[in-house]
Image (cartoon, grey):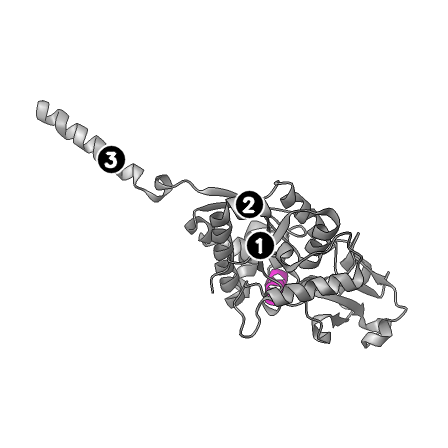
């Protein structure tokens, strides 16, 4: 009987040690809330690819994605510590630093090329950029796409305005083009993208507060690395990314999400550049463009806008 008790104790200890050594128990996952620039859209598919394929979990992260109401909202929510990381426009971040002193920086870039564009109905007769002079252009609520930078990255009402022929043109990000074209059909659209005109400044990227960068650098680094894994997979297989996005948010059409993922890939992938890596010279260029359009209350330096070291070369 005594031997049986010893065997039972030994088995119990073995079971306990096996339980404690399982990955789930060996290390608790760090909770991370990510706020988007605007709602849930196909352009955000790579975040959900990283969730679906366990890339965040592999990085010991439990990521929750919440919907933002524009880049300004995302910056403010991150600045108020309502989200650890956010996805927001670099130009809006420059404005937030210069005018509101919100202590938020870019840690990785996603839209390495300008995403801003103006889309016009082909039947409006607007065929080339000079035809835009005097044209009525609908902007996102509170936005400034036509003035170079959007305060909001999108608006649910814009496709309807264009589709209903209530305005000939709308200001919109190129990543919104698939949905815009679908909703405007059978009308054809003409695109005037800032990037096509040779303009060079940063668009959206991943952001965090100065405090988070200083005290939770490892969490930010792991989040950025896992997100880039999701981006690489999404860009390699946009159709799969579209299906994954639709799985998490069924209201988003698979084909639209696929198209938006392709559009993100077009903005994110720069020849000879590492995905997600921030170039300080491009940050300076972005600040200069903002300064040429907006009056800032306080000067903004390159080091105010981005934090290096969060993307592996």
- Crowding at dot 1, Cα within 10 Å, few <14 / some 14-19 / many 20+, comes out as many
* Residue 257 seen by the camera: yes
Is label 1 in a helix, a strand or a loop?
helix
**In whole angstroms, how far apart are the C-alphas of marks 1 and 3?**
41 Å
**Residue 199 position within the rendered picture, expressed as x and y whole percent measured from the top left:** 71, 72
Sequence-wise first label, 2 or 1: 2
- Crowding at dot 3, Cα within 10 Å, few <14 / some 14-19 / many 20+, comes out as few
Is label 2 in a helix, a strand or a loop?
helix
- Give, as a single range, the part of the protein colored magenta: 255-264
Direction from residue 244 to residue 305 in the image, left or right: right
- In the picture of the structure, the residue carrying the numbered disc 3 is 15
**Residue 99 position within the rendered picture, expressed as x and y whole percent measured from the top left:** 75, 50
**In whole angstroms, how far apart are the C-alphas of marks 2 and 1?**
32 Å
**Residue 104 position within the rendered picture, expressed as x and y whole percent measured from the top left:** 63, 49
Q: Which is more foreground, mark 2 or mark 1?
A: 2
- Would you identify the image quadrant in which residue 47 lies? bottom right
- Confirm whether the magenta stretch covers residue 38: no
Q: Is residue 282 above or below residue 60?
A: below
**In whole angstroms, how far apart are the C-alphas of marks 3 and 2?**
39 Å
- In the picture of the structure, the residue carrying the numbered disc 1 is 246
Sequence-wise first label, 1 or 3: 3
Residue at the spot x=88%, y=71% of the render? 133
Residue at the spot x=74%, y=65% of the render? 289
- Crowding at dot 2, Cα within 10 Å, few <14 / some 14-19 / many 20+, comes out as some
Q: Which of the two residues, 261 or 55, is positioned nearer the viewer here? A: 55
- In the picture of the structure, the residue carrying the numbered disc 2 is 212
Question: Disc 3, disc 2: CB below 8 Å?
Answer: no
């Amino acid at each position: 009987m005594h031997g049986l008790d010893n065997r039972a104790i030994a088995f119990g200890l073995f079971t306990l040690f096996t339980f404690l050594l399982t990955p789930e128990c060996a290390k608790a996952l760090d909770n991370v809330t990510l706020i988007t620039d605007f709602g849930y859209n196909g352009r955000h598919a790579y975040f959900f690819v990283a969730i679906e394929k366990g890339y965040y979990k592999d990085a010991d992260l439990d990521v929750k994605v919440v919907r933002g109401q524009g880049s300004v909202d995302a910056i403010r929510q991150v600045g108020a510590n309502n989200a650890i990381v956010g996805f927001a426009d670099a130009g809006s971040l420059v404005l937030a630093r210069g005018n509101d002193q919100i202590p938020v920086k870019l840690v990785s870039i996603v839209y390495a090329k300008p995403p801003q564009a103006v889309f016009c109905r082909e039947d409006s007769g607007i065929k080339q950029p000079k035809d835009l002079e005097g044209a009525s252009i609908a902007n996102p609520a509170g936005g400034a796409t036509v003035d170079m930078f959007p305060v909001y990255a999108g608006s649910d009402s814009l496709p309807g305005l264009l589709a209903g022929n209530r305005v000939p043109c709308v200001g919109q990000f190129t990543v919104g083009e698939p949905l815009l074209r679908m909703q405007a059909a059978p009308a054809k659209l003409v695109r005037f993208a800032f990037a096509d005109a040779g303009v060079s400044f940063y668009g959206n990227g991943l952001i965090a507060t100065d405090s988070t960068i200083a005290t939770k650098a490892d969490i930010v680094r792991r989040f950025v690395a896992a997100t880039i894994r999701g981006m690489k997979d999404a860009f390699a297989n946009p159709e799969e990314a579209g299906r994954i996005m639709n799985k998490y948010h069924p209201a988003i059409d698979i084909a639209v999400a696929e198209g938006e993922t392709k559009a993100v890939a077009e903005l994110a992938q720069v020849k000879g550049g590492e995905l997600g890596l921030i170039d300080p010279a491009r940050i300076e260029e972005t600040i200069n463009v903002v300064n040429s359009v907006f009056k800032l209350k306080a000067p903004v330096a390159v080091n105010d806008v981005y934090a290096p070291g969060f993307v592996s070369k």
